[in-house]
Image: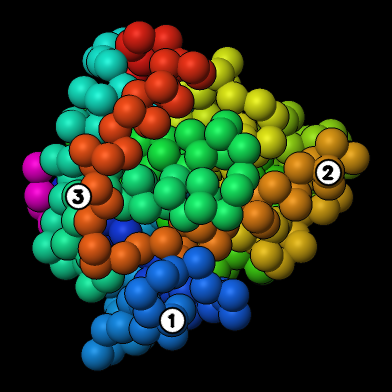
Amino acid sequence: MSTTNAKNTPLASLDEWEDDLLRRYPDPETIATSKGTEEYRNYEDPQRETVKEFYRLNHTFQTHDFVMKKRADFLKFNRKEMTVWDAFDFLNELVDDSDPDTDLDQFQHLLQTSEAIRRDGHPDWMVLTGLMHDMGKVLCLFGEPQWAVVGDTFPVGCAYSDKIVYPEFFKENPDYDNPRYSTKLGVYEAGCGLRNVTMSWGHDEYIYQIMKDHLPEEGLYMLRYHSFYAWHREGAYEYLTDDHDKKMLKWVKMFNPYDLYSKNPEPPDWKKLQPYYENLVKSYLPSTLKF
């Protein structure tokens, strides 16, 4: 499947939304081994209208009702059952030629992320988190539009923070003026904890739900909230968090640069790495996963 033909999506690349992330949040300490962070996502036109259109769709249609329907549908996990390695082959169907940083397939990008984590001596569960963190993008192969798969995530069911990228687009969202959802707390209570908050639908929540019985809490927070930039970069929605969230925040912050800056044009040597990763997956995951 070509990502350029995905339904209702304005992005030329599935990962094009990350272009905007790297402009918004350049990291001074690069994880990359081949080039500096300033060289990443180097397009001739840095202000790409496709990103704005992507977020217009995302902010218009990611309502509380929409998210609850997607959760009820996809969290049945009744579409495919695969080994992890077959799932990576399936994910590789999302390769496209428009990413300026790499022409590697999705699996190789995930290997680069996990290898950067391993190179820095982090625990094996975090290496596995790096390997699996984008697996939820298979949602595109199940017919989901890109605005319901990638992009910055945010709570639904309460007022939208102005710290979310392009907050002006929320004015078209039906929840924006809904008395139940438009107050600061909405359907939540102060300090309720993020585990009790419903996030916008996308690959973060999907892979978290798939992996929630197989990784430690720190890894699960990395999966579930690595795109929640309004929280972990901008400090928004702290009134919904509890002490546990505050403890986990450092792990989300630790993971994020490995995702953004690990891309390298040199493909990983899978033959050399295969024994390690096969043992790693076997140590944590069942023989098959349900999607």
Residue 4, magenta (yes or no): yes
Residue 59 forms part of the magenta stretch: no
- Along the horizontal axis of the image, is 140 left or right of 162? left
Give the CA separation, mark 1 to mark 3: 22 Å
Is 42 drawn above or below residue 17 in the view shown? below
Compare marks 2 and 1 and give the one earlier in the sequence. 1
Residue identifier under label 2: 247
Residue labelled with disc 3: 105
**In whole angstroms, how far apart are the C-alphas of marks 2 and 1?**
30 Å
In percent of width and height, residue 116 lies at 47, 54
- Which residues are the magenta region? 1-5
Dot label at residue 152: none
* Residue 156 position in % (x across, y down): 61, 43
Identify the residue shown where x is 54% and y is 78%. 26
Q: Which residue is mark 1?
A: 36
Amino acid under disc 3: Asp
